[in-house]
Amino acid sequence: MIIAPSVLSLDFTKFNEQLQILEESQATWCHFDVMDGHFVPNLTYGPIILEAVKKVSTLFMDVHLMVNEPRKFVDMFVEAGADQLTFHYEACDNEQEIMDLIDYIHNQGVKVGISIKPDTPKEALDPYFELVDLILIMSVEPGFGGQSFIESSLEKIKYAKSKINELKSRALVQVDGGINDKTIKLVRDSGVDVAVAGSYIFNQDILKAVDSLLKR
């Protein structure tokens, strides 16, 4: 399993120190929660933070766009060093817009993911399993860190993994929200490939926290 610590929970007064610890940990991805204050009721950071992390980190840069009109954000985050851009199904008006956005992101030379909120039916993902590199299942309402895991997300994870296996897709299944040393077993058993964790990792010893997610 891949562990993707979320920069949203990083202590910015210890920016370089905590990033160095991540480099020494078993985490291989770094997750960026980008919020525009419209798609979700919170505002986070822009590409300048990604640029800063990229200068001192060798981790895979995984950018989660929780924004309206995600197409407008693609170029700036690609230029800042994103390795993968994930956008929300709910931020697009129709299937054709989603298809065009997937193609556009891929044409920029980066991987692409699609995400759904907890209330979105799992079947909404059906047209995209063979087109994307990542399926992100939100296990909390997007917008804020530190929320409790929504257990109904496990059904969506199992569904996504089953579809991917059935179609022989290359896509990975990612989960984001409420991941800790207890919920990690639930998502692993459901078929998750990538687990995003924020407050659980950064609110304690980072090395031990990452290890605990991989050992359970």
Image: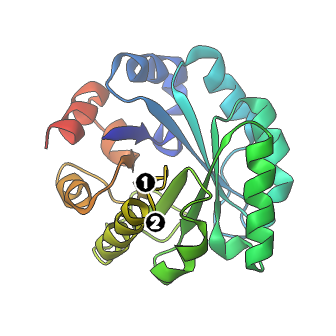
| Nearest the eye: 45 or 84 | 84
What's under tag 2, amino acid-wise?
A: Met
Instruction: Please give the name of the residue rendered at 46% of the width and 76% of the height, measured from the top-left corner.
Output: 118
N-term mark: 1 or 2: 2
Quarter the N terminus occupies: top left
Left or right for 12, reference 36: left
Q: What crowding class fits label 1: few (fewer than 14 Cα within 10 Å), some (14-19), or many (20 or more)? A: many
Q: Quadrant of the C terminus?
A: top left
> Is 74 left, or right, of 26 in this rendering?
right
Q: Is residue 174 above or below residue 4?
A: below
Camera-side residue of 131 and 7 = 131
Q: Position of residue 197 (x, y in %)?
A: 38, 47
What kind of residue is marked 1? Gln
Rendered image coloring scheme: rainbow
Residue for point 26% across, 29% down: 205
**Residue 174 disc label:** 1
Name the quadrant containing residue 88. bottom right
Measure the alpha-carbon separation of dots 1 and 2.
8 Å
